[in-house]
Image (cartoon, rainbow, N blue to C red):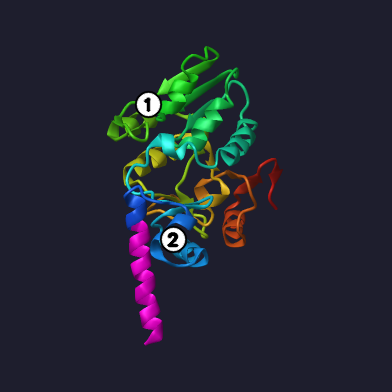
Amino acid sequence: MTSNVHAVLAERRHQLILRALRAGGPAAVTDLSEQLGVSPATIRRDLVKLEEDGLLTRVHGGAVVEEGDQPFAEVAEVRVTEKDAIAERAAAMITDGQSVLLDIGTTAYRLARQLHGRRLTVITSNLVVYEELADDEGIELVLLGGMVRREYRSLVGFLTEDNLRQLHADWLFLGTSGVRPGGQVMDTTVVEVPVKRAMIKASEKVVLLADAAKFPGHGMAKVCGPEELNAVVTNEPVDAATRASFQEAGVEVVVAGKVQA
């Protein structure tokens, strides 16, 4: 009986936490603790559970809800140092003269910033990447067609996929909403998944860019399995279960300047 009561109370707290975050209310652990009248430790446990269920993402000191299209500008401000470390290491993989496909997302944008002054062909559906590289005359820039997702600054749809069927790139640098322990690459936005899959088919080598917050990760739609990746670039050692899945699939895991065994 007591355990059932605790379960009901926890479920109610979870509903209130999600409601507060969706309404743009307090996202910090301390604020949520005060609002709900429970300890910060309880809130942290609640946030862990909600993240495991794929309902929110924990960030430093609190959480955000990734419902629908989170504006690109908001996501771009999260974990910038980690993304820059990943971007710098990824840029070192590319040789001048090669062609590079850059996925949507903020880590791909940070990678684009590392490519200035290089002699490359960059293909992208990421409007922020396009804007970043548009004035760099050393880069041959290909912007894929498609329907514009204004909030997330990307292009999607059958036109984007059709463009990709006509192209081939040496590298794809792929983003993700999260990676499951089995190595499956996930995404929370279904409309982006067909484009990501078309990018994989159009590329010689596929590198996943994923900071430590994506392990273990969640998402409603599967983009690909580990067998379709050549490498993963992250900023901290990957958890044991996911690392084992990558090793079994022959995926190289690169951790900010070193290769994880």
* Predominant SS along the magenta part: helix
Amino acid at the residue labelled 1: Leu
| Near-viewer residue (253 or 4) | 4
| Near-viewer residue (196 or 201) | 196
Residue 20: % across, % down: 35, 54
Q: Is residue 193 left or right of residue 59?
A: left
Which residue is at 34% across, 42% downward?
A: 69
> On screen, 14 above or below 79?
below
Number of residue marks? 2
Q: What residue range appears in magenta?
A: 1-18
Whether residue 197 appears in this view of the structure is: yes
Amino acid at the residue labelled 2: Glu
- For the N terminus, the quadrant is bottom left
Q: Secondary structure at mark 1?
A: loop
Residue 124: % across, % down: 43, 28
Circle 1 Cα neighbour tier, 10 Å, few/some/many (<14 / 14–19 / ≥20): many
| Near-viewer residue (79 or 164) | 79
Which residue is at 70% across, 40% downward?
A: 257
Give the spatial CA distance, label 1 vs label 2.
47 Å
Which residue is under mark 2?
34
Residue 129: % across, % down: 46, 26
| Marked residue nearer the N-terminal end (1 or 2) | 2
Which residue is at 30% across, 30% downward?
A: 148
Whether residue 225 appears in this view of the structure is: no
Q: Is residue 216 left or right of residue 126?
A: right
Residue 144 marker: 1
Which residue is at 62% across, 61% downward?
A: 240
Circle 2 Cα neighbour tier, 10 Å, few/some/many (<14 / 14–19 / ≥20): few
Furthest-bottom residue in view? 1
